[in-house]
Image (cartoon, helix red, strand yellow):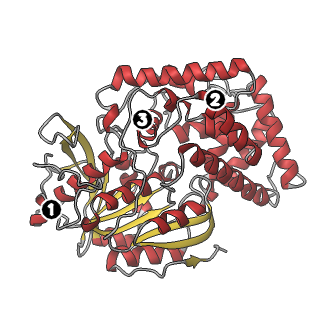
Amino acid sequence: MAAVLAALALVAGACGGPGGDGRDGDGAPAGPGGAGVRDALGWDGCGDGFECARLAVPLDHSRPDGERIELSVIRLPASGRRIGSLLLNPGGPGASGVQYARGARTVVSRALRERFDIVGFDPRGVGESSPVRCLSSAELDAYVGLDASPDSPGEVTALQEGSRRFASGCQARSAGLLPHVGTADAARDMDLLRAAVGDLRLTYLGKSYGTHLGAVYADLFPGRVRALVLDGAVDPSLDPLEVNAAQARGFETALDAFLRDCLRAADCPFTGSVTSARAEIAGLLRRADTRPLANSTGDGRTVTEAWTTLGMITPLYDRQAWPILRQAFGRALRGDGTPLLRLADLLIDRRQDGEYANQTESNLAVNCVDSPYPADPAVYAAAARESSARAPLFGAYVVWSSLPCAYWPVKGDVRDRIDAPGAPPIMVVGTQRDPATPYEWSEAMASQLASGVLVGFDGDGHTAYLTGSACVDRLVDDYLIDLVVPRDGTRCPKIG
């Protein structure tokens, strides 16, 4: 998710009821935004030039006069001639949009900061917005450390029991919220936020899962779209276990790109070929499975195969982190898993004091209600075997990571098509060797959206905007500021 890269109030009324096709209407904007009200939220200064507010929204959008929950919102006011607000979402699901927007001076360009209020928000169930809670931090440590690439009946049983405990913990601690944390609910919240900040139409930059949120918004409210950039897109048409398998292949592709680069570096711990280096990594994972790596943090965790795998994945999100991964592999091959453990903590937002943000919990809570996951663990086992054949290092791990959804206690609003007919041109950006959202997903989303326009980047790492490509940055800024739509199929060249 893009948040990994960043790491390295009341509104009256509600959305209109859904029509026969599940869309909430595509006419002129409703609510306070339609009247051009800029400041329907009670903003207070919250440091470093930012302002913060709370936005009340219905827990259940089908009952707009019922129970309400609050969303945490932040903005950095425009420094120049203001167009409106640019809403951000960094992905996940489960990443904090508030914390992401806190980094606005590095995650969006100066040109965008001059023309837009940069607005971040924690979606419902995330961060400071009525967060989903499921397990204690100690229980989360145990869950994350489970062997998610089981190779014995006992390991399969342990993973099933841990996944069942996760789902039941969410039901015990967040039962009222769980049915209402899906992406369609978050998109309806985003329309209330658009209205609250006084924008007639939405201007939005979504990354990774944030592309799904943006696409669902456009599908529900096509007439309320001004400009959407969907960077590192997901493919909404895929079966959820197909998503896992494709993502595992994406991590394999990114690892190979890392290894090719590593073998040219003086401090690379591997020698020989990419094939021989992959064999060393496979051996490292096998050793961690039976004899965990050392952990010098003093927090009592054992660096199992699962923690080792997570630590490997984290730096693959960002090419600039590859030197860190070289050093971490060097230490791990000598038996010290501490650097990989610390990298894993970044990915799952585990803090130095041992406490977790709710990213892991909210990620599963959203995913499990957004997609029709199978309920039979045997289906996951078969999918893991099939995925391992094409992604031997990551296939089983990524597929089995969704097992709690087999036991999930509620169902959500699963949208089987997202095409947003009637929306203005929507810009979809894909990176050729993106580890988390493979390039073909961006191609798929652009083709499914009725007005999708694809921009490709011949690059490495997760998402493209402000990662070093002046071509991508210019196209995104020109589109968001002046509504200059790039030619569909535009390709931005490799850096260097």
Question: What is the quadrant of residue 496 in the picture?
Answer: bottom right
Characterize the local packing of mark 3: few (<14), some (14-19) or many (20 or more) Cα atoms within 10 angstroms: many
Q: Position of residue 365 (x, y in %)?
A: 42, 35
Identify the image quadrant of residue 144: top right
Q: Earlier in the sequence, mark 3 or mark 1?
A: 1
Q: Amino acid at mark 1?
A: Gly
Task: Report whether 292 appears left or right of 25.
Answer: right
Determine if residue 166 is in view.
yes
Residue at 64%, 73% in the rendered image: 494
Mark 1 closeness class: few <14, some 14–19, many ≥20 residues within 10 Å: many
Label 1 element class: helix
Q: Which mark is residue 378?
A: 2
- Which label sits on residue 33? 1
CA distance for labels 1 and 2: 49 Å
Counting residues from the start of the chain, the first of labels 2 and 3 encountered is 3
The residue where tag 3 is placed is 365
Amino acid tagged 2? Ala
Q: Can see residue 352? A: no
- Does dot 2 land on a helix, a strand or a loop? helix
Image coordinates for residue 339, horizontal then vertical, percent: 66, 38
